[in-house]
Image: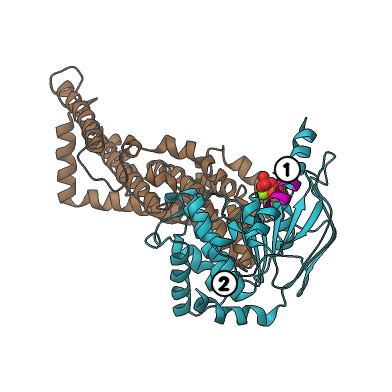
Chain colours: A cyan, B brown
Amino acid sequence: MSMIHTAAATRGRAHTASAISVSDVSHTYGARTAGGMLALDGINLEIGDGEFHCLLGPSGCGKSTLLYLIGGFIPVQAGVISTSAGPVTAPGPDRSIVFQNFALFPWKTVKDNVLYGLKKAGFAAAEREQRAQRYIDMVHLTGFENAYPSQLSGGMQQRAAIARTLAVDPGILLMDEPFGALDAQTRRVMQEELRTIWRDSRKTVVFVTHDVQEAVFLADRISIMSARPGRIQHVIDVDLPKDRGEEILENRAFIGLSEHIWRLVREQAVAATRGAH
Amino acid sequence: MMNMAQARPLADARKSPVQKAPAPRPARSISPQVVDIGVQVAVVVVLAGIWEFGARFGALNPFLLPPLSMVLVRIWEDLIAGTVPVDLGLTLYRALTGFAIGAVIGIPVGILMARSAVVRWFFDPLVSIGFPMPKIAFLPIFILWFDIYDTSKIIMVAFSCFFPIVAATYAGCSSLDKWPIWSARCFGAKERELLWEVYLPMAMPQILTGLQVALPVGMITTIVTEMLMGGRGVGGAMIMAGRFADSVGVFAGIVQIILLGFVVVKSVELIRRRILIWHPESRR
Ligand SMILES: Nc1ncnc2c1ncn2[C@@H]1O[C@H](COP(=O)(O)OP(=O)(O)OP(=O)(O)O)[C@@H](O)[C@H]1O
Ligand SMILES: [Mg+2]
């Protein structure tokens, strides 16, 4: 694993000191019409270079919206989002995203999906092939290189999307519930892969999840968001060893922290259901 | 994926029952598909038989409806004499050339309409008026402008194919799923590259549906144009036969048109399946 990423890591870091700064960002859907809906309300967030940051929050609180804003897919209406490359105004290859719904190109095979990003990133033909295969193997899709997305299960499509994004080795990695469609076993394997990749390449990762254990296992810091309109309610440091394996799940500190965070998330979820009535 | 589903009802209506067979795609087994085809062939054979014997044993005046065998013999004779290949070839050439011109102009216009407000302002009223209009009404003008030979015929065909192609392409390109577009932009695709790399492949099912609607329209227009203008070609030959009260000749033309239409439409269905190999519709 580590062999794969070291070369790429230096390249990725060379041009960006990846860090994200979100200040006073609010977002209203349908702002131009009368019945606009406030999705994010005054978000402030500083994500350090090389930090693994998890976003937790009830469904519909604006986690995806925040990722789209950081990715530059939707325009920032209020506040400022900047990376070390300057204010975010459009999508860029320094920030790559794994979408919640995968967003593969349905007319391309798994391999061609992965190759697309690599081509755009300017890898030479031989290296493209090699990298594509390596990442397809990594997400355990070996043998499905020539399958079309419509021939794959949801979890397989999700893994293809992960391979496609990881292969281009972005400085900032945005992941929107990237393991949501996976079974518990595969999820665990992928979490460990991702930790390894992150540790070896020192990317900045913003990772959205509903799974508290997953967040604690992966993150340096965790932001807990409130129910709609989304606000950052708590930011929690995860003081656990950098090297985390299966055994950490038994760790007292891990369990304690998970329970603590779970209670905080639950508060928000309860508030969300109450708000709905 | 949402928008792709929208093209289905049209596509479905045009599907032969063969494709609806639930058998998995690669299966060329002897099961439902073959039975399906067998039944369809049987229906055609029975109808042909009714025609043949109905005409032969006096149910109908053989001048008004000559027996099928006579018609087939005539086609065979003309085939050997060399008139059938020339007429069929000319008709096919005119239909396909006109269709191709209509596609080459119609697809880009449809895409541009979806992407640019200016182009849409210009073409939307034209397409709205032109789509339901009987295009053949323009034939006298085209004859005036382009003379009576191939050019005016082909332009007539291109003109009639243009509208369904523009309409389908425009509809296909203006309801594109945003996710693949966002993916491509995330990987650094430029606006210009998006056109080829994303919009076109994503709108392909709708564009192909437009082409599938336009092709029969083009064939009809070719035949009608040939009938109105005379000269070589299946339509012209039929009018000629009609003038000489040669009913066998007229029916020979009809049978040729039926066969030609069948082959062309089936070929396009096959091409569609090849191009949309990635699409769930190819796997039902
Ligand atoms: N395109 C849109 N137009 C209008 N409203 C939207 C749109 N996208 C999202 N919303 C609204 O904004 C809010 C935040 O949506 P978002 O998708 O960011 O939530 P989320 O936290 O990612 O939820 P989940 O965990 O279910 O994925 C939701 O209440 C949703 O109704
Ligand atoms: Mg979401």
Packing grade of label 2 (10 A; few <14, some 14-19, many >=20) is: some
On the image, numbered disc 2 is attached to which residue? Answer: A120
Identify the secondary structure beneath mark 1.
helix
Q: Chain of mark 2?
A: A
Asked if residue A33 shows in the view, the reply is yes
Query: Residue B23: where, in percent of width, then height?
Result: 30, 39
In this rendering, position of residue A21 left or right of residue A219: right
Identify the secondary structure beneath mark 2.
helix
Asked if residue B114 shows in the view, the reply is no
Q: Which mark is residue A266?
A: 1
Residue at image position (69%, 49%) is A259
Dot 2 amino acid type: Lys
- Viewer-proximal residue, A38 or B181? A38
Q: Does the segment drawn in magenta span residue A261?
A: yes
Q: Is residue A175 above or below residue B257?
A: below
Magenta span of residues: A258-264
